[in-house]
Image: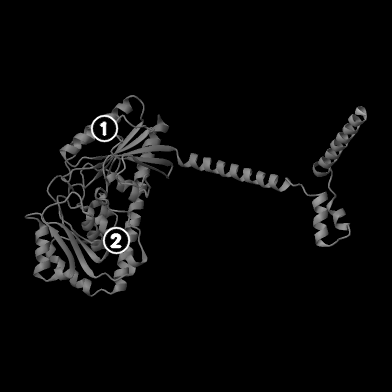
Amino acid sequence: MRLTRKRLCSALLAAYLLFSLYAAYSVFLKPRRPAASRAAAPREKQGREHAVLGTEEWNPWEVDEKNDLQRKSANSLQLLKKMQVQQEQTDLRVQIWGKAAIGLYLWQHIFEGLLEPADVSAQWREGSVTAGKSLFSFITGPAVVPGYFSVEADNVVLVLNGREEEKISYATQWLHYAQTLVQTHKLQHVAVVLLGSEQCRNEWISPYLKRYGGFVDLLFIIYDSPLVNEEDIFHWPLGVATYRYFPVVEPSWSMLHTPRPYQCNFLGTIYKNSTREILVDVLKQNGLDKLCWISAREEWWPQETNESLRNYHDALLQSDLTLCPVGVNTECYRVYEACSFGSVPVVEDVMTPGNCGNSSVSHSAPLQLLKTTGAPFIFIKNWKELPAILEKEQNMTLQQKIQRRKQLMEWYRQFKAQMRQKFISALENSFLAKDGGG
């Protein structure tokens, strides 16, 4: 009896195995009928046709396998293309150390790069951008301290402030750190973006430059320095006051087309015995202060309050012209900030005391960089010219002002793009050429 049961179980098991093998053969291995045979077969109702295909020809894994293969193939192709593009675009890896506020103008306004975290008070912020044949990374914040962060590229751009003695002392610490890295072969090339002295007294940087026996390959310097030769020492724009959190401004339809209630604006510090006093007097004597947004103060503020910053942005946005009197130097943040809001800068085109704008080298100083790039500003030599300028403003139509705003904002967009390309080309031409030659 036990033997019979055992044989029966064995027979059932064998039958199950045979059926399983036949099913597997039918689904995976059985040759399919050619298309001609299928076409010749009597057509039945569509529901029946799907049923026949379901039992005889449909592989439940075939579609998934085919889709998976297609996905893998597409992903592999995309990966290969991405690797190829990265390889083509990243012949040079450059790490930018932003140890001066002007670094934010370079990164956020000219390179249009982002920073993480977005919190401007963060101890460490970073970002990366591929441009030209180079991969640029940017680090900034109080936590970026010599010797306490990872140097992740053979090529470095140091952004430094050399405007005054205290700043120069701090800048030299970074230069010595970079010099040590070069001497120990941890860095190959170094460039510097320098906020120079407003009197263009920048002799202290010369011993660090390679042309004078130092290690710095390239220098990008702000203000009309006589050091500039546009070969290894380049003129660089001051830009906006990022230390006061001036934002990246995106142009809008209303910014271009809306009538502005004020003909001009000036919000700033009035220094004793300066042309700024003359400017305010001219406005008041001619009753023009009623046409303009004027807010003068006697002391310079290193930081703005939320209210004063908001008022300043509103004044730029609601004025057709922005008055830009000289300070310690002719070039000021206000010029670029006005461009951001489509308010035409009226620039006092006079030399300030110091070593800037050597007339034997260039007749276009001051503001040589802006003039040679065709800045559509109003340049004046004396603020007594202002009443005639404002009278002309009153006779302009809205359409004429809209066209002028478009011209200004397009120029500024192209100017930043031109500066970006100038920066990238200088680094690539210098660093890659030296690498290839070495």
**Label 2: few (<14), some (14–19) or many (≥20) C-alpha neighbours in 10 Å:** many
Distance of label 2 from label 1 (alpha carbons) = 36 Å
Quarter of the picture containing the N terminus is top right
> What residue did someone put label 2 on?
341
Residue drawn at x 38%, y 38% as measured from the top left: 94
Left or right of 234, for residue 348: left
Relative to 93, 302 lies left or right? left
Residue pointed to by mark 1? 175
Along the viewing direction, whichever of 318 and 182 lies nearer the viewer: 318
Q: Residue at x 22, y 58 (%)?
A: 307
Residue 409, horizontal then vertical, whole percent = 32, 60
Dot 1 surroundings within 10 Å: few (below 14), some, or many (20 or more)? many
- Under circle 1, the secondary element is helix
For residue 75, what is the image quadrant?
A: top right
In front of the other: label 2 or label 1? 2
Give the amino acid type for the residue marked by disc 1 in the picture. Answer: Leu
Amino acid carrying label 2: it is: Phe
Q: Is residue 249 above or below residue 188?
A: below
Residue at the extreme top of the image, as rendered: 184
- Residue 141: horizontal and vertical position, in percent? 30, 40
Q: Residue at x 81, y 61 (%)?
A: 46
Can see residue 344? no
